[in-house]
Amino acid sequence: MMRRCIVALLFLAIAACASAPRVTVPTLAYAVPAVNPASYTVADTTSVLVRGGRGQSLNTTIALLARATVGMHVDSTGMLASIRLESVDGTFQAGDSVAFRVDSSAVPSGAALLRMSRSGADSTMHLPSVGRALTRFIGGESFYYQFFPRLPGGTVAAGTVWTDTLRLSDEGAGVQSRTETIVSSSLTGDTAIDGRVLRVIVSRFTTSVDVNGIVDGMQVSQRLVGSGEATTLWDESASLLFSREETVTSTGTMDLPGANLRSVPVEARTRRVVRLLP
C-alpha cells in the first residue's frame, strides 16, 4: 500500500510538472537593437511662472519639437550610443509674445556619444557643439539621456522596483545647470500596439535643479525641487525604447542681484514625450 501511495504521488507530481505553463521572466536590458539606428520624435513643453512683487508675474513657455536618430554599436570597451539631432522647431514665448524661434538651421553637425551599460547611459563621451540660440532649448546631457530610461539590466518579475540616481549637467547661453534625479521604477505589465508586445514601466521620481549664470547681462541663480512620474513602453524583443511620457512639477526661488530681487517664487511644469518613429 505504501508503495502504491508513493507511486501515485510521483505520478501526480510528474503530471503536474508536465502540464504547468512555462513562465518567461522578462529581460529589461539595453543591447544593440534589432532596429539600428532608430528614429525618434521628442515633444517637450516647459511652462515657468515667476511671481514678482506687487502682484506682478511673468509666464514663459518653451516648446520644442525635435527628431533624432539613435544608433548603438559595440567597441573594445563595451556599448556606445550615438544620438544625432536631425531637425528642431522651437519657440520661446514670454507672456503673449514669441520672443524668438529656432529651426533646423541650428542643428549641430555632430552626434552625442554616450557610454552604455545594460541598464542605460552611464557617462558622456562627447557632446556636439550647439549654437547659442539652440542652447535655450537643448543645453547638454539632459536632452540626450532622455532616450535611455534606466532599466534593471537583466531579468525582472512584474512588481519589482529598482531605483537609480542620475546627475546631469547642462550648459548654454551663459547658464549652467546641475540636475539630480532619484527615480523609482517598476514593471507593471504588458500592452500591445500595432502588433508589438510592449513592457509597461511606471516611474516616480524627485528632482532638484541648480541654475547659475548670466542672462541678458544679469546674474541669475535659481533652485528648483520637484517630483514627477513617467510611463515607459519597452520593446523587449527588439531591445528598443518604444515611447516614454513624463510630467514634472517643480517649485523654488530665483535671485537677480542686479535687479535687487531675491527669493522670487518660481513654478515650473514640464511635459515630455519621446516616441519611436515607424
Image (tube, rainbow, N blue to C red):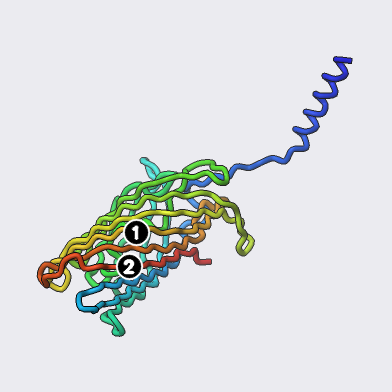
Q: Earlier in the sequence, mark 2 or mark 1?
A: 1
* Residue linked to disc 2: 268
- Occupied quadrant, residue 119: top left
Q: Is residue 105 above or below residue 147?
A: below
Q: Label 2 neighbourhood size at 10 Å, few (<14), some (14-19), many (20+)?
A: many
Whole-number angstrom distance, CA of label 2 to CA of label 1: 9 Å
Q: How many numbered marks appear?
A: 2
Q: Which residue appears at 81% of the width and 24% of the height?
A: 9
Apparent side of residue 134 relative to residue 215 in the rendered image (left or right): right
* Residue linked to disc 1: 226
Apparent side of residue 163 relative to residue 94 in the rendered image (left or right): right
Name the residue furthest top. Answer: 2
- SS of the residue under disc 1: strand
Q: Which residue appears at 45% of the width and 64% of the height?
A: 274
Q: Nearer the viewer, residue 42 or 252?
A: 252
Evaluate if marks 2 and 1 touch, with contact meaning CB atoms under 8 Å apart.
yes
Name the residue furthest bottom. Answer: 97
Q: Which residue appears at 17% of the width and 70% of the height?
A: 215
* Tag 1: amino acid: Gly
Quarter of the image with the N terminus is top right
Residue 44 image offset from top left, x and y in percent: 39, 69
- Occupied quadrant, residue 76: top left
The circle on residue 183 is none
Residue 79 image offset from top left, x and y in percent: 40, 46
Q: Which residue appears at 58% of the width and 56% of the height?
A: 198
Residue 115 visible here:
no
Residue 161 image offset from top left, x and y in percent: 49, 45
Q: Label 1 neighbourhood size at 10 Å, few (<14), some (14-19), many (20+)?
A: some
* Tag 2: amino acid: Ala
Residue 188 visible here:
yes
